[in-house]
Structures are given as structure tokens and as C-alpha cells.
Image (spheres, rainbow, N blue to C red):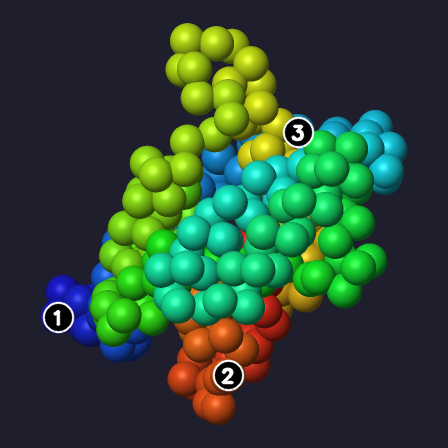
Amino acid sequence: MAQNTEESLRDTPVVSINPQDPYENWNRKVFSFNDTIDRWALKPVARTYRTFMPDFADRAITNFFNNLSEIRNFTNSILQLKGESAVVAAGRFTYNTVFGLGGLIDVATVFDLPERPEDFGQTLGYWGAGSGPYLMLPFLGPSSPRHLSGWGADGFVFPSLWDNVDSPENYYARGLQVVDQRADLIPAEGFISGDTYTFVRNAFLQRREFLINDGKVTRDPFASDNNDDLMLDDF
């Protein structure tokens, strides 16, 4: 009996505690749940979307939702005292709305005004708020207390242009946005190597650090787990 117990303990995988991910055991369970939902529901829809949606229409939908985010980028740039970024966000929204058919065409990038993403999570980081532990949230995916707080604040302060919750168009637009974002991630799946959970975690943490520091990242604190140094914008 004792021998069987010892063999069982030897066969049990030992998960080291990562300082950025103290709740890894729970997070992996949530990740598995999200992955199941994705494989059986969201990803098949996204693949169908990519198959039948013309490239120009797919790009136009992505541009439209990105253009709406410029209002958030502008406000958070102001809160972070980033005058140049605020001007860029205002210029992008104006150019794309007026000359880009309501945001369907990204003419601002052609005018040398690339997007500078800013959210309230970045604003909190700018003013010294710590990230907190890595969290994998049901349905929402990778996050942290700071990121989640910023996401909630942005959603409260910047309601969508279809903010009538009783209108079915609201749900259609939200659903289209989710499917469009998931479809845009499909090509990036080929870069995933090793343990998928670890890869997604490291990509998210690297991306957030990159954004918080405006690209001024002098070290890679997450490279010890793997060589998963790919920046994925939507992770």
C-alpha cells in the first residue's frame, strides 16, 4: 500500500509557483473551461466567418471597432498626461470617421498616424498601481486585477454607440465584434509552442508590460518559463 502511495506521488506533476501566477492551479482549470467553450463554439464560428467573409469586409469591420476605441485612447492619453498620444487619437478618429466612411477604412495610418492603444489599466499603471497576480477569467480570458479594473472602468465610462440594452442590434454588434476578434487570432495560433496555458499567460503579461511602458521594455521577466516572447495584441 505504501509503495502504491509513493508511486502515485511520483506520478503527480509538480507545478512550481510562479510569482506572477500564484493561482496557477485554479487558472489552469478556468483556462481548460474557456478552451472547451472556444473549441466547440467560438472557434468554429470564427472559422466559418473567415471562410465566407471577404477580406475587405473583414478588414472594414475590424477598422470600425478599432475606430470607436480611439475615444478611449484619447481620454486615457489625457489622464496619463500624454499630449502627443491624445492628439494622435483625436486625429485618427477624425480622419477615419470623416474620410474613412465612418471608420471602415483606416486612412489615418496612411497619413502616418498609427494607433497608440491606451486604456484605464494603463492609466492605473502610469500612476503607480501594481498589476497584481495573473488571472484567467471565465469567458473573458487572461487578465489581472489592474487590467480588470481598467476594463470595467472603460466599459462604464465609454458605453458603446449602441448603448440601448433593450435593442437587439446591441447584441448583434457585440457578437460580431467578438467573432471578428477571434477570427483575427486564428493565424497567430501557428506560433503557439509548448504548453498552451504558459504561452498565453506569457504573451499576455509581456503585451501588458509593453503597453504600460510604451514599448520601453529593457528586460523579459517571463522568459524563464519558455521562449514564448511573441507579442499577441489580443491576448
Q: CA distance from mark 1 to mark 2?
A: 55 Å
Say which of marks 2 and 3 sits in front: 2
Instruction: Say if 36 sits above or below 185 in the image.
Output: above
Residue 48 % position (x, y)? 75, 29
Q: Residue at x 32, y 68 (%)?
A: 125
Residue 111 % position (x, y)? 79, 59
Q: Is residue 190 in view from this perspective?
A: no
Q: Nearer the N terminus, badge 3 or badge 1? A: 1
Q: Residue at x 49, y 53 (%)?
A: 74
User: Residue lying furthest left in this view?
Assistant: 2
For the residue carrying disc 2, how many other residues have a C-alpha within 10 Å: few (<14), some (14-19), or many (20+)? Answer: few
Q: Is residue 159 in view from this perspective?
A: yes
Instruction: Say if 187 sits above or below 225 in the image.
Output: above
Tag of residue 215: none
Which residue is label 3 attached to? Answer: 45
Residue 202 % position (x, y)? 46, 70
The residue closer to the viewer here, 146 or 69, is: 69
Q: Tell me the kind of residue under disc 1.
A: Ala
Q: Are marks 3 and 1 in contact (CB under 8 Å)?
A: no
Which residue is label 1 attached to? Answer: 2
Please give left or right for residue 68 compared with residue 191 in the image.
Answer: left
Q: Residue at x 53, y 38 (%)?
A: 38
Which residue is label 2 attached to? Answer: 216
For the residue carrying disc 1, how many other residues have a C-alpha within 10 Å: few (<14), some (14-19), or many (20+)? Answer: few
Instruction: Say if 196 sits above or below 41 in the image.
Output: below
Q: Nearer the N terminus, badge 1 or badge 2? A: 1
Please give left or right for residue 79 compared with residue 23 in the image.
Answer: right
Q: Which element type, helix, strand or loop, lies under badge 1?
A: helix
